[in-house]
């Protein structure tokens, strides 16, 4: 396992966490994530020597830590820039505790996105392997 690679690629998650708090809207956020997933998959395919799926999975788990922490810490700014998400949280369990909901849902989203990024990394490895 290349922990250094995992940490460095997780910094995309830190950048996205700050970006989504201040200037990236939820409407365009998926496009940023797609680009990030493709870049991460390419780096993992070329730099990891095995366990490509797990590299992607761990990158997304660490991403979820960055994102959840930043969104909870900078909650006041997040709320100002994401009124739709705050409205949606009122219909979820614990509507009066949105930070707790973030702490609960963050890791769940991290696992789901980890499965997707893991698959991206594995597929990228298969494509890189075929070209060599």
Image (cartoon, grey):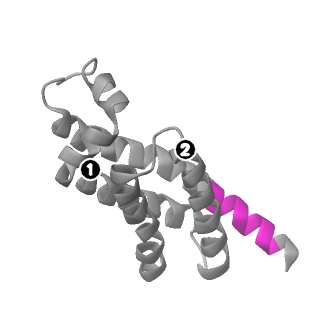
Circle nearer the N terminus (2, 1):
2
**How many numbered circles does the render carry?**
2
Judging depth in this view, the residue of 53 and 120 nearest the camera is 120
Which residue is depicted at the point 18% across and 23% down?
Answer: 95
Residue 128 in which image quadrant: bottom right
Task: Report the mark closest to the observer, 2 or 1.
Answer: 2
CB-based contact (under 8 Å), mark 2 and mark 1: no
Q: Is residue 78 above or below residue 55?
A: above
- Is 22 covered by the magenta stretch? no
Residue farthest left in this picture: 96
| Residue named by callout 1 | 71
Which residue is depicted at the point 18% across and 54% down?
Answer: 73
Q: Which residues are magenta?
A: 120-129
**Relative horizontal placement of residue 127, taking residue 24 as reference (left or right):** right
Q: Position of residue 34 (x, y in %)?
A: 61, 52
- Which secondary structure, mark 2? loop
Residue farthest top in this picture: 91
Residue farthest right in this picture: 131
Q: Is residue 121 above or below residue 2?
A: above
Residue 63 in which image quadrant: bottom left
Which residue is depicted at the point 79% across and 66% down?
Answer: 127
Q: Position of residue 4 (x, y in %)?
A: 43, 82
- Is 125 covered by the magenta stretch? yes
| Residue 28 numbered tag | 2
- Which secondary structure, mark 1? helix
């Amino acid at each position: 396992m290349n922990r250094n690679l995992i940490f460095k690629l997780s910094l995309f998650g830190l950048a996205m966490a700050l970006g989504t708090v201040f200037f990236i809207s939820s409407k365009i956020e998926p496009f940023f994530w797609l680009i990030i997933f493709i870049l991460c998959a390419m780096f993992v395919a070329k730099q990891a020597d095995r366990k490509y799926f797990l590299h992607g999975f761990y990158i997304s788990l660490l991403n979820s830590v960055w994102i959840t922490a930043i969104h909870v810490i900078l909650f006041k700014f997040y709320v100002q820039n994401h009124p739709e998400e705050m409205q949606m949280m009122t219909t979820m369990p614990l509507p009066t505790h949105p930070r707790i909901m973030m702490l609960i849902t963050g890791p769940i989203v991290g696992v789901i996105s980890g499965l997707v990024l893991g698959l991206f990394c594995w597929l990228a490895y298969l494509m890189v392997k075929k070209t060599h």
